[in-house]
Amino acid sequence: MKPSLIRLLIIVALMACAGAIFSSVMPDFLKNHIGIEGDVRGALEVPRELPGFLLVFITGILVSIRRHNAFGGVFIIGIAAFIGLAFLAGTLPTFVIFMVLWSTSTHAFMPLRDAVAIDLAGVNRRGWVLGRIGAFRSGGLILGAGAVWLLMKHFEADFRMIWLFAAGIMVLGAVFSFTLPERKEKNRSATKVKRFLYRKEYRLYYLLCMLFGARKQIFLTFAPWLLVSLFAQTAPDLALVMGISAILGLFVKPWFGNMIDRFGERTILMIDAVLIALLCSGYALVPNLFQPGIALLLLYSFFIMDELLFSLAMARTTYLSSIVHDKNDMIPTMGLGGTLDHAVSMIVPLIGGILWVMIAPWAVFTFAGLVAIVTFFVVRRIPGKPETGYRSAH
């Protein structure tokens, strides 16, 4: 692999490591340290997803900054977020401030990561490269989840120590980011930078982003909340299962990437939609049909499968890369797609929180299953095997 790709993979692993720490600790921290309930948990997704909603503007800034500076800035924001969580997040309002700061870091990172990966992939290895990105992300998740499990389970570390450990990981990420070489382009100074971009030819991509936003938020918000609130699971428990899914991801995610290259986005995303609908049925039914021990085992199995399928979002990126008029369209188009994704992501948790409190948890996952069914029929509109390479604008 190219040295620049190796650096990118390391950066991806470090960001994933910090992300695993935040994701595995946050439900426990909110439930047992701050003391919130399901409706508030759903409402918290509005400020948490706000940076994603503003992603079209964030990417408008990023495209005008040299890549190593953009990556470095993203990690510096993350460092500030974790230091704030460690020393200042004793109440819900202060937690929200630093949660939003961390969310800004992660949301700005994603389009940068994918655009650089597609650039390095060339024409015929998009799925292959994104699969390796997924594998290194899994490696980072293993490190982060393992650190939480080890430090909290065996060394009795408190939340402050965990947040500071995550800040240290982000410092390493910043160091590697500033070593990432800038892309070499002919006549760079003459290249017109597109800060904001909308093309009607990309409407199907935008619609897929919106549907993914709904599917994503059910998994990120209510799957772990189900485990914490109904089955009394804690941060080390969630970290352990995240670590298991990450270990499996080391092997499964590169295979997913190869399958996208081989069969095309349409086939893979249709299969994904069917599997998500089945998993949502499982989330809805299992807590009411089985004894707690068996139900917990099944739910953790669903959680692992859900996390692995989550990585099939890379198929949307490869689909976009096959239809864009120009490779410089990638970052601003992903920015608009991210904004649409998060417009939905900010609404769905509110609906889910109301369903959770007013009806029952099963209603939340039934709603998610309906989203998966709609996604299946939308995905059928993707051509069976999109042509490779960037299409000419002419």
Image (cartoon, rainbow, N blue to C red):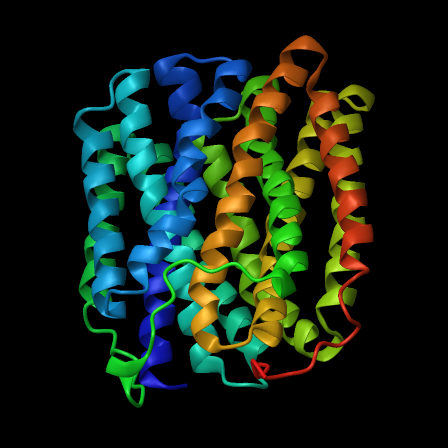
Q: Quadrant of residue 172?
A: bottom left
Residue 371 visible in the displayed image: yes
Instruction: Indicate the position of residue 120 as horizontal and vertical percent values.
Output: 43, 81
Q: Residue furthest top?
A: 358
Q: Quadrant of the N terminus?
A: bottom left
Name which residue lies at 36% across and 61% down.
195
> Along the horizontal axis of the image, is 180 left or right of 297?
left
Instruction: Indicate the position of residue 383 as horizontal and vertical percent values.
Output: 77, 71
Instruction: Indicate the position of residue 357 as horizontal and vertical percent values.
Output: 63, 11
* 385 to 13, vertically: above or below: below
Residue 17 visible in the displayed image: no
Instruction: Indicate the position of residue 181 as horizontal and vertical percent values.
Output: 25, 78
Name which residue lies at 72% across and 73% down.
264
Closer to the camera, 24 or 350?
A: 350
Q: How many marks?
A: 0
* 368 to 5, vertically: above or below: above
Q: Quadrant of residue 184?
A: bottom left
Closer to the camera, 78 or 214?
A: 214
Name which residue lies at 56% across and 65% down.
317
> Along the horizontal axis of the image, is 93 left or right of 297?
left
* 250 to 285, vertically: above or below: below
Name which residue lies at 53% across and 25% down.
233
Q: Quadrant of the C terminus?
A: bottom right
Closer to the camera, 290 or 113?
A: 113
> Along the horizontal axis of the image, is 370 left or right of 11?
right
Q: Residue furthest bottom?
A: 186
